[in-house]
Amino acid sequence: MLDNVEFLKEKMVLTCKVLQKQGVLDGYGHLSARLPGDRILSTPHMPPGKVALRDIIVIDMQGKKLEGSGEPNGETPMHTSIYKVRPDVQCILHYHPDEVVAVSVASQGIKVVANCGVHFYRGTPIYDSPVLIRNHERGDKVAATLGDRNAVLLRGHGGTVVAKDLDKLLRLGIDHVRSARIQIMTASLGPAKTHTQAECEEMVKGHDRPNTNRRYIDYYVSEVVD
Ligand SMILES: [Zn+2]
């Protein structure tokens, strides 16, 4: 199990580096991953893109720190609330990309106007408050807004994506921002055609194939390692 935990920590650090390189992180935001026994690995209260292996902390399902020298993030309740109601979720990214914030204040959610948005075809509901998620009550409301989807927008604040593994989380984390960016670009061109429900369903059929994210992940990781 220890080896698995160390592997997971290394992968979290690499995921943060890739997201930082792609310009979707800033000084805030956080990434976490579920461990067996109601424990969670989390980036600590520091810029996630600057996190090293030694910085990753372990917290419990109440957000209390169990291991590590750093402190938990103020918005940890968002993570614990989602893990409690979504047993399928193994990792969570919360961040504040400008494009996602812009879409959230326009009350649009992510529209599937490009193939990178197809992950979000079941909707990206908007949590209708810009106030930070610093207590369990607000965490529970974000989790309820997320429902069974893989992304939720927080109005004027940012977005949260969830996944079953870190490869998928990385892909969703980048594609969420790309989708928002293309949506904003197309808005200046007049009415945009969105993918139909049938097109989206056809496209996501292949998403659970083994190694379906391999080429995508290899490309982005190659941008941060030699
Ligand atoms: Zn936030």
Image: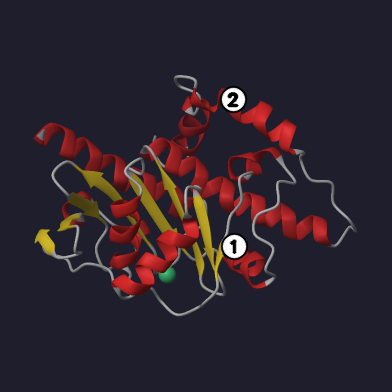
Work out which quarter of the rendered image holds the C terminus and state it: top left
Q: Amino acid at mark 2?
A: Lys
Where does residue 54 sit, x and y in percent of width and height? 16, 53
Q: Is residue 185 left or right of residue 79?
A: right
Which disc, if any, is residue 205? Answer: 2
Is residue 69 depicted above or below 36 in this figure?
below
Which disc, if any, is residue 100? Answer: 1
Is residue 205 depicted above or below 192 in this figure?
above
Q: Is residue 131 left or right of residue 135?
A: right
Q: Secondary structure at mark 2?
A: helix
Which disc, if any, is residue 182? Answer: none
Foreground label between 2 and 1:
2
Identified at 49% across, 66% down, the residue is: 96
Q: Residue furthest top?
A: 210
Which of the four quarters of the rendered structure image does ligand 1 lie in? Answer: bottom left
Where does residue 35 sit, x and y in percent of width and height? 20, 43
Is residue 28 depicted above or below 123 in this figure?
below
Number of numbered discs on residues? 2
Q: Residues within 10 Å of mark 1 (few under 14, many from 20)?
A: many
First in sequence: mark 2 vs mark 1: 1
